[in-house]
Each structure stands twice: as C-alpha cells, then as structure tokens.
Amino acid sequence: MASLNPPSYSASYRPYNPYLKKPSLFKMVCVTFLCSAAYLFGVWKHSGGSDVMTASPTDFLGTIRCAQMKNATQLPTATVVLDFSTHQAAEDTITLPPPRGPRYFPACDVKYSEYTPCEDTKRSLKFERDRLIYRERHCPQKAELLKCRVPAPYGYKSPFTWPESRDFAWYANVPHKELTVEKAGQNWIRFEGDRFRFPGGGTMFPNGADAYIDEIGKLINLRDGSIRTAIDTGCGVASWGAYLLSRNILAISFAPRDTHEAQVQFALERGVPALIGVLASKRLPYPSRAFDMAHCSRCLIPWGVYDGLYLIEVDRILRPGGYWILSGPPINWKRHWKGWQRTQEDLSAEQSAIEAVAKSLCWKKLVEKGDIAIWQKPTNHIYCKKTRKVFKQPQFCQAQDPDRAWYSKMETCLTPLPEVSDIKEIAGGQLEKWPNRLQSVPPRISSGSLDGVTAETFREDTELWKKRVAHYKAVSNQLAQKGRYRNLLDMNAHLGGFAAALIDDPVWVINVVPTEAKINTLGAIYERGLIGTYQDWCEAMSTYPRTYDLIHADSVLTLYKDRCEIEDILLEMDRILRPEGTVIFRDDVDILVTTKSITDGMNWDSHIVDHEKGPHQREKLLFAVKRYWTASAPASDQQDPKTVS
C-alpha cells in the first residue's frame, strides 16, 4: 500500500515539471552568436566606421565606457581644451541634455546698467540719514528681485590690460564726467577723447600717488615684506591702492555708492581691488586682525565722534603691530586751515579728539611729518589691560566673536587680542614676511583655532589647488594666457588655495567666505597675505556691474540649493561678470546640468567637462562664457552713423 506521506526531498532532488524541457545546445550557440554580432555591429555604427575593431584593447574600452553618473551622457577620457576666444564658441565635445528647455531671461532696461541692488540710491532714501545708515547695505526683498540681465552700456569695450589699465579706462564703460570737473585741480582723473586717464593724483598727493607712497615709505618700511595687506577708507578712484601693487602690497579700497560719480567703478575698471562700503553702524565685512595697514587720505570720516566708534572698528581689523595712516584734515591744520575753509579752533579740537581715541586704544603715535601722521597698534594687550584704570573707555568687549562681521553691529568696546604670556610676544602669532607668508601655515591654523583644519590639511589643500588650477588652464587656453584676466572672484574660497595658485599671474582675487560656510576661514586667508570678504550669496554683492573677468564657484550652488533660487545666484553672477568673462563651476553633475539649462537661457556659452581625476567622479566642471552684448544705441546715435564705433 502506498504511503500517504509526501516523499522526503534531498537537496539535489527537483520534481519533474512537464513544462520545462532540456535546452538545446544548438539553439544556445545560435542565440549567443546573434547577440554578439548585434553588439559588435552597434559599436561599429556608434564609432562611425570600422576603426574600433582595429583599435587596441585599452582604446576600445575607453570608447565604449559606460556613463556612471545619473543624468549624464558619455564624457571624454582625455582633457578637452576649450577655446573661449572672443566672439567664437569652443567646440562643444560634450552634450549633456538639460532636464527641461532653457528659460529665457530678457535684458533689463538700460537704466539698470549700473544697478547695485543692495546699495540702490532710491531704496536708501527710506532709511536713516544719521551716521550714513542709509548708505549701508539694504537689499531688495525676494519679490523685488530683477529677473533680467543687466546690460553693459552701449559701446562697452574690454578694459585695458594690466598694467596699462592702471592709467586708462574707456569712457564708454563708465560714462561719467562729473569727477573730471569736480576734481579738475587735484589730478585725479582726466577725460581724453574716448578714454579717461588717471594721472595718479589725489587731494592730499598732488605730486602723484607714487611720490606720496614714497613719503610714507620714509616713515615706515614698505619694502621688506612685513606689510602685505592694506585697506583704504574713502578711496576715491583708488590710486593709493593702484600704486601700492608695485610694492607687493595688496589693498582693498572702499567708498560708498555714489549718486553720480562712480568712484569705486573707476577703480575696478583700472584693475584695482575695490568694493562698495561705508563706515556707519555695521562692522566692515572683514575678520579681526586682517590688515597690516589702514589708510585715510581726506576720507572725511569723523574719527573722533560717537565715542571713537570708527577708530575702534579700524582697531578690530588691524593686525597686532599694524599701522594707521591719516593725511588731510585735521593733520597739519596750521598750514591748511584757510584752504579747508574751517576755523583753527574746529580743526584743533578735531585733532585732539583723534589723539585721545588713539591713546585710549593703546596706539602709539610714531610720527607726524608734513601732511602725514602714523599710529601703530600694540602687538599685544598686556599693557593695555592695565591702563583700563586710567582710560575708563572703551572697555574690552565681552563674549563676542571678533571675526563675526556680516550685518554685525559696531560696538564701542575694544576687541581683545589673543592672550600672550610675555610682553614681547605677538598676539595671535608672528606672521612671516611676504612672500613666505603665502605658503606658511597661518597662525590661526597652527594654533588649532580652526576646527578640523590642521597644518597637514593646509599643505594638502595648497598642493591640491595647484593641480586644479593647472587643470583649469589645460581646459581653458585663455586662462593660461597671462593678461587675459585681471579681476577675479572666488565665491567659496575655503583656505584661499585657488588665489594662491595664481599668485604669479597678473591677477588679483577677492576670496569670499560665505556666511553659510561651516568654518570661518577668512582670517587665515588674510594671514596668507591674500584679501577677501564675507558674503551671503542669496543677496547681491557690494560691487558694480561688470566687476570681474573670471568667477570661480566651487560647490556654491550645492551650498545654497535649499536657501535660495539658483537662478537668482546666476543672475547676480551675470550682473557682476564682464561681457566675455568666464565662470568656472565645480559641483555635483546633477547641479551642473540644471545650471547649464539656466545659463543657456542667459545667453552664455557653456561646456561640462570631466573632473581632473577623470570621468568617474560625480563632481564635474562647467566652463561658461558670457557672450558680448550691450544696450541698444541711444536714439541720437542711431540717427547719426558717425557716432557709432
């Protein structure tokens, strides 16, 4: 009798299934042959001929390499040299289709050709005029943002190359003659035909900035590398900063946004570092202990009022042992008081007030000779803390971050220097002289002040950016041409490695540390002998349109993707980028595909290329060039063809 229990199956036992038949060997061979033939035929068609079949195995694998990145098409293995020549687009060897068609961004009205969103003269009238608060940054709300491209003025030309640009700028680029009349007797600027000429003069240096700087050089050493970074308050057309460059001193020049005369814009056309700025109620956007030297030549800042607030701010940004230089009222008032149209009593009281504030900050007056007076900040605060019993004000600030300087209110308290154990010790650490300072480990890093940044990671970062910049130059032949670019912006500078790698090129770089950065590295950047500022890229930068020849954006769009619209950041970049200027984006490939779809609608030519380590990196590079275009010719020029260049 058969058992009612099911059979016990072993591991190798499979019950018979009448629907499964034993496969035929002949059929398997046929299918394999047909699949292989179809595959090879497809490769042959894709390569455009039979060359693939005769290529080496390595070349063959390179040809059929699969794309590893989401939304990315095949990318080249070899370095692609992109030619960004004027009016000629490079061959686009990479095609990454955007996820959607590009949105077109129209040109703004010509009235916006000098638009500075956060220093708009009409908007500023809504704010307090006391202490120049109305001239500080007041940015538009989201609903007020322009969704158009700011035009260059009709007739705009590429600026003169450095060093010729120090002395000349095209009139069509900054069509304002007000200064040529207002400062006619002070040798600031002259109008000559189709251009401006900058003789290098100034209100307090009629013999020229070079001769004026030589006078300063007789009082303090400007040539031994101990002074590298400087700041010029109320800079005019920045001739002081322009002529310091020949002495390897890098100055940031700033002045308020003008209603008519675009003084800072003239500085930028000359190829000199400059930003719109004002001493009012907020800290300047620089870290503490940043500058070796600060300068004011008839800058008309009331240094002695508001309990010395503005000199207290200068003290914050001066490094230990740094210098403050003042020329113009009230210095040498006994000689100039009639020309300044002020009373002797008024000028004498102003100088006494300045002297009193400087003493309360423990500054030492080194010299007053002719029209120049120079004070020096102490190298530490050991002695200064003892004098608080004598100078009741200002007291030392308590529990504040001295490097916090983005919309931070100025306070009438003295920023304490880092603690030292000996009166001869330099607070915060001794800085190397230039040029050794550039490659030396910044004291903020060697002391462990920057979380997660060590001397070793600093050196690795320096070497990394040397390789990356070399790769950039291999991709963009114009970046490799010295003199093609002058004004550069690094939107996310980290430790300043990008700028450091370009130090032998005739360029200057504003290194931006975004307010969203995890680590505030701007102080270390200054300790390297470089310059920079803080910036929130959801807002406009404090500069005029067409400031920069090249913008470097390392992971900026990823940093801000959840905070504001990418298109608003890109439109701001378009505003501050010169016609035919270049942008180098370094970011995740998905971000770059989206970015390219937007820049296509902004009339940019752009190309995505591989990471310097090869095609298998998610991080890619997007090289973009803003095409040349300007506002239409005025009606009068259209009617008179002789006026059209």
Image: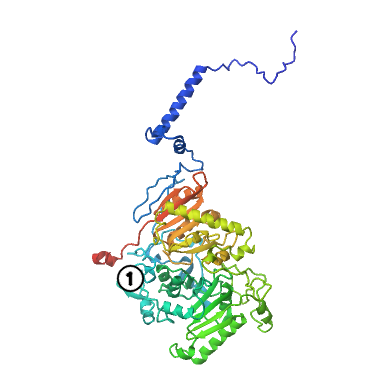
Q: Nearer the viewer, residue 138 or 529?
A: 529
State the residue at coordinates (74%, 9%): 2
Up-down: is 304 above or below 227?
below
Q: Residue furthest top?
A: 1
Up-down: is 110 above or below 342?
above
Give coordinates of residue 390: x percent, y percent: 67, 84
Q: Nearer the viewer, residue 148 or 158?
A: 158
Q: Nearer the viewer, residue 359 or 6?
A: 359
Give coordinates of residue 217: x percent, y percent: 48, 78
Q: Which residue is mark 1?
A: 195
Q: Amino acid at mark 1?
A: Arg
Q: Secondary structure at mark 1?
A: strand
Give coordinates of residue 57: x percent, y percent: 46, 34
State the residue at coordinates (42%, 79%): 211
State the residue at coordinates (56%, 77%): 310
Quick one: label 1, few (<14), some, or many (20+) residues within 10 Å?
Answer: some
Give coordinates of residue 519: x percent, y percent: 60, 60
Which quadrant would the N terminus be assigned to in this image? top right
Tell me: 322 left or right of 195: right
- Is residue 395 visible to us here? yes
Q: Quadrant of residue 147?
A: bottom left
